[in-house]
Image (cartoon, helix red, strand yellow):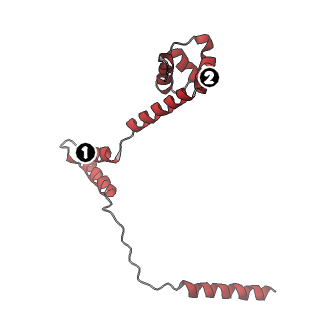
Amino acid sequence: MLTAREQAFVLAFVGEAAGNQAKAAELAGYAKGSAKVTACRLMQKANVKAAIANRAANLTRQSIADAAERREILTAIARSKDSEHRDVAKAIDVLNKMDGLYIQKVEHSGNVDIVHRLAQGRARVSQARQAHA
């Protein structure tokens, strides 16, 4: 359990202080003269470190659009009356790629006999070795 000041430190560290420990300590209300020492002491505490990691993970998850949200945004662009033609086409193209609709099909019409080719290569190496011996 965090104290109110520790909680303020965590919020400041992940937020306004952007990872600056001393600044986070000052913003949390700790004395400016001892902010570095206090911040170092706070960062030694397991519960403070865990709270920072948890808060940072939550912020990261909130800031990254998941696949469903990206689909919604692209669909809105594709359906918008205000979107330019190229934007609509690009949105549809990206949605198709996300859905795997652009599958490359490759036809192979030839017989590659790898065993035969390896044997030929080995024979050439053997001949070259004998020639140099």
Q: Residue furthest right?
A: 133
Q: How many marks?
A: 2
**In the foreground, 115 or 14:** 14
Callout 2: helix, strand or loop? helix
For the point 34% across and 48% down, the residue is 67
| Residue at numbered disc 1 | 77
Q: Amino acid at mark 2?
A: Cys
Q: Secondary structure at mark 1?
A: helix
Name which of mark 2 and mark 1 comes first in the sequence. Answer: 2
On the image, which quarter does residue 122 sit in? bottom right
In the image as oriented, which residue stretches furthest toward the front? 1
**x, y (%) of residue 98?**
33, 55
88 vs 121, nearest the viewer: 121
Look at mark 2 in the image and give the residue it sits on. 40
The spot of residue 74 in percent (x, y) is 28, 47
Which residue type does callout 1 highlight?
A: Ile
Q: Is residue 113 above or below residue 59?
A: below
Label of residue 30 in the image: none
Q: Residues within 10 Å of mark 2 (few under 14, many from 20)?
A: some
